[in-house]
Structure formats: structure tokens, C-alpha cells
């Protein structure tokens, strides 16, 4: 995957904690202080109980491959083929991402395979969380 022309995310006040975390090499999620649900994507209230009593937490960075599609068309910033994936984080939420550091084939991308987060630095402010097969 070539990231030279990849669209740059634009942090908002609600997502700044997430991007500060990825810049520091940490995957940050939100957790409800009332019902204890851990969730993603970022938002100012809990999607389960609507509480605004939310806090951030550091995730383990561990995940499993929930679903994916291998994209074969040329798109600015990406070299086909590349996997567009949904991973299930060890803490429960799912997130869309890309799978890297392995062949982009159905033989290599096995559902439920163990993954770990890695970060791609776009610039001094944004590092993208990507996932690769877990080592060991």
C-alpha cells in the first residue's frame, strides 16, 4: 500500500484524543462510566445508554479479523490489491482499517486470525492505526 496520496484524517474536538494516542503509538478507545461499554468510533456520549460520563482508555492493540474485501482497483494513495478490513478489537468494538505486512490474498487473510496494531506515520500530527498478523 502506498500512502503518499492517501487522504489525511481531519481531527475534531471529539476525535482529538484518538489521534493524539495514535501519534504516541497507543490505540485509545472510550468507555462509559455508567454502563462500562467500550466503544468506537469516538463520540461524546455512550451509544448503549446515552450517558455523557465517558472516559478514554488505552486498548491492548490486539484484534481478530472479522471481515474484509480485497480491493483491486487503483485509488489515489493505495497500490492494489489491498485489504479493506473490519477488525474486532480485544476490548469488543469493531473498526475499519487495512491489513498490512502479509499477502493480500484469501489464503493469507483468514477470518478470526490474530492481529496486532501497527502505526503508519503520515506526518507529524497523524499516524494511522493499521493491523498486521500477530507475532507469536
Image (cartoon, grey):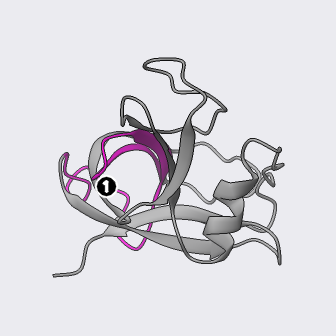
Residue 36 place in picture, x, y as percent:
36, 37
Figure disc tally: 1
Would residue 70 be seen by someone viewing this image from the given angle? no
Vertical order, 135 against 5 (above or below): below
- Residue 110 is one of the magenta-drawn residues: yes
Residue 118 as seen in the image, left or right of residue 111: right
Residue 113 place in picture, x, y as percent:
19, 56
Residue 132 place in picture, x, y as percent:
37, 68
Most distant residue in the top direction: 49
Would you call the spot at circle 1 few (<14 residues within 10 Å), some (14-19), or many (20 or more)? Answer: few
Would residue 79 be seen by someone viewing this image from the given angle? yes
Which one is in front, 60 or 8? 60
What kind of element bears circle 1? loop
Q: Residue at x 17, y 48 (%)?
A: 112
Residue 89 place in picture, x, y as percent:
33, 50
Residue 93, by quadrant, is top left
Q: Residue at x 19, y 51 (%)?
A: 110
Magenta residues?
A: 83-111
Q: Residue at x 23, y 80 (%)?
A: 135
Residue 30 as seen in the image, left or right of residue 74: left
- Residue 67 is one of the magenta-drawn residues: no
Q: Quadrant of the C terminus?
A: bottom left
Residue 80, by quadrant, is bottom right
Vertical order, 125 against 107 (above or below): below
Which one is in front, 69 or 91? 91
Judging by the rendered image, the residue that carries numbered circle 1 is 105
Which one is in front, 33 or 4? 33
Q: Quadrant of the N terminus?
A: bottom right
Amino acid at each position: 500500500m502506498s500512502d503518499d496520496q492517501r487522504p489525511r484524517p481531519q481531527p475534531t474536538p471529539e476525535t482529538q484524543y484518538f489521534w493524539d494516542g495514535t501519534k504516541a503509538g497507543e490505540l485509545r478507545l472510550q468507555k462509559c462510566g455508567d454502563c462500562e461499554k467500550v466503544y468506537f468510533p469516538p463520540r461524546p456520549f455512550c451509544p448503549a445508554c446515552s450517558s455523557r460520563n465517558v472516559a478514554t482508555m488505552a486498548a491492548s492493540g490486539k484484534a481478530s479479523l472479522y471481515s474484509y474485501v480485497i480491493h483491486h482497483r487503483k485509488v489515489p494513495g493505495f497500490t492494489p490489491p489491498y485489504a479493506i478490513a473490519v477488525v474486532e478489537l480485544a476490548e469488543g468494538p469493531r473498526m475499519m482499517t487495512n491489513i498490512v505486512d502479509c499477502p493480500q490474498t484469501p489464503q493469507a487473510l483468514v477470518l478470526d486470525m490474530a492481529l496486532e496494531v501497527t502505526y503508519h506515520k503520515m506526518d507529524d500530527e497523524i499516524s494511522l492505526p493499521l493491523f498486521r498478523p500477530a507475532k507469536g
